[in-house]
Image: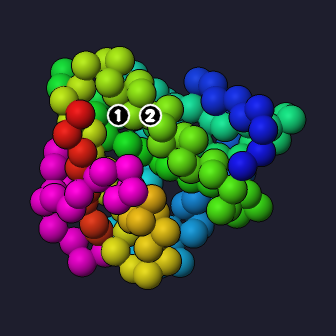
Amino acid sequence: MPTALEIRIDDLHGPEIAALLHEHLRDMALHSPPESIHALDLDALRRPEITFWTVWHNRELLGCGAIKQLDAAHGEIKSMRTSMHHRRKGVAAAMLRHILGEAQRRGYQRLSLETGAPVAFAPARELYARFGFEPCGPFDDYVEDPYSVFMTKNL
């Protein structure tokens, strides 16, 4: 992992984050049909119930992640993404640790997520499992979908 990672709240207005989220949505479209893609665009990520962070090293954007508050005790991880140029370097693990810490500071009792079921999403599912997330059923407005895996962790 690069030293001196900086994780900061992002206003989603910079060209770097627009490019990373475009990469994210493009990648989702390669592995899931449109009705099974739950990634949010820039406008949706700016909603007040979502806090969005980016990971930087030496002015280079490495990744991002967000929490959506579902209710006072339950949050959802959204938009976890590592740039394709920085995968397998610990960026996602650093972001996930940050999100878990923030969820605990907020007093959440549970943190959940939706990720893809196809093989391309196996590294993400393995990362979440290493951090104690377990499979669960759909939550919030999600429904059963063969392209989705739902996971949760009690805090």
Rounded to the nearest angstrom, the CA distance separating label 1 from label 2 is 11 Å
Task: Answer yes or no: is residue 150 visible.
Answer: yes
- Name the image quarter holding residue 126: bottom left
Q: Residues within 10 Å of mark 2 (few under 14, many from 20)?
A: many
Q: Nearer the viewer, residue 22 or 69?
A: 69
The residue that label 1 is drawn on is 68
Q: Residue at x 49, y 69 (%)?
A: 123
Q: Nearer the viewer, residue 8 or 27?
A: 8
Q: Is residue 40 above or below residue 146?
A: above
Q: Residue 44: x percent and y percent?
A: 44, 39
Mark 1 and mark 2 lie on one chain; the one further toward the N terminus is 1
The span shown in magenta is: 128-147
Instruction: Report the amino acid beneath label 2.
Output: Ile
Q: Position of residue 57 (x, y in %)?
A: 79, 37
Q: Main SS of the magenta segment? A: loop
Outermost residue, bottom side = 119
**Which quadrant would residue 130 be assigned to in this image?**
bottom left
Question: How are the colours assigned in the image?
Answer: rainbow
Q: Which residue in the structure is indicated by mark 2?
A: 99
Q: Position of residue 113 (x, y in %)?
A: 31, 50
- Would residue 55 be counted in the magenta stretch? no
Instruction: Identify the amino acid type marked 1.
Output: Lys
